[in-house]
Image (cartoon, grey):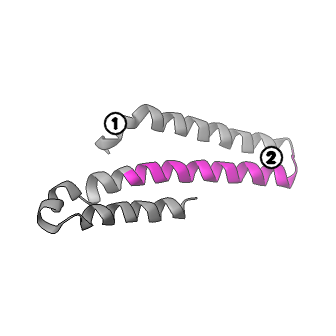
């Protein structure tokens, strides 16, 4: 995953925030917090994980799956549109 190097610090920051959220879930369970508090923390953590997954997946799609810049010359702009459509679908799935 060499292409993630350009955003390495941003990705690491996301992972560190997620680790903090998981630690908060553990503390809530140890302190026997209410179900709603624990569920809210789990949901927040899941959202953060989905956000990280979406960022890495979008970069993967842009980098490896569709090379629209080269294809545009031979097939028109539809390949770039297909790439953006795929990214939009993926993003909507993770919301």
Instruction: Find out whether residue 26 is within the magenta segment.
Output: no
Toward the viewer: 71 or 6? 71
- First in residue order: circle 1 vs circle 2: 1
Q: Main secondary structure of the magenta part?
A: helix
Left or right: where does residue 74 sit relative to residue 34?
left
Left or right: where does residue 12 sit relative to residue 72?
right
Which labelled disc corresponds to residue 82?
A: none
Residue 36 locus on image (x, y percent): 84, 54
Q: Look at the numbered disc 1 and give the secondary structure of its residue.
A: helix
Figure label count: 2
Q: Residue at x 11, y 65 (%)?
A: 74
* Structural crowding at the residue carrying mark 1, measured as other residues with C-alpha within 10 Å and reported as few (<14), some (14–19) or many (≥20): few
Left or right: where does residue 37 sit relative to residue 54?
right
| Mark in front: 1 vs 2 | 1
Q: Which residues are magenta?
A: 32-58
Q: CA distance from mark 1 to mark 2?
A: 36 Å
Instruction: Find out whether residue 45 is within the magenta segment.
Output: yes
Q: Which residue is mark 1?
A: 5
Residue 2 locus on image (x, y percent): 29, 41
* Structural crowding at the residue carrying mark 2, measured as other residues with C-alpha within 10 Å and reported as few (<14), some (14–19) or many (≥20): some
| Quarter assignment of residue 16 | top right
Which labelled disc corresponds to residue 29?
A: 2
Q: Quadrant of the N terminus?
A: top left
Toward the viewer: 25 or 50? 50
Residue 8 locus on image (x, y percent): 40, 35
Labels 1 & 2 near each other (Cβ < 8 A): no
> Farthest left residue?
74
| Quarter assignment of residue 39 | bottom right
């Amino acid at each position: 995953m060499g292409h993630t190097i350009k955003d390495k610090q941003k990705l690491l920051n996301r992972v560190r925030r997620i680790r903090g959220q998981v630690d908060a879930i553990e503390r809530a369970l140890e302190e026997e917090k209410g179900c709603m508090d624990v569920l809210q923390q789990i949901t927040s953590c899941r959202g953060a994980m989905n956000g990280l997954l979406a960022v890495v997946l979008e970069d993967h799609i842009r980098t490896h799956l569709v090379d629209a810049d080269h294809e545009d010359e031979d097939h028109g702009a539809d390949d770039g549109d297909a790439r953006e459509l795929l990214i939009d679908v993926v993003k909507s799935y993770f919301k």
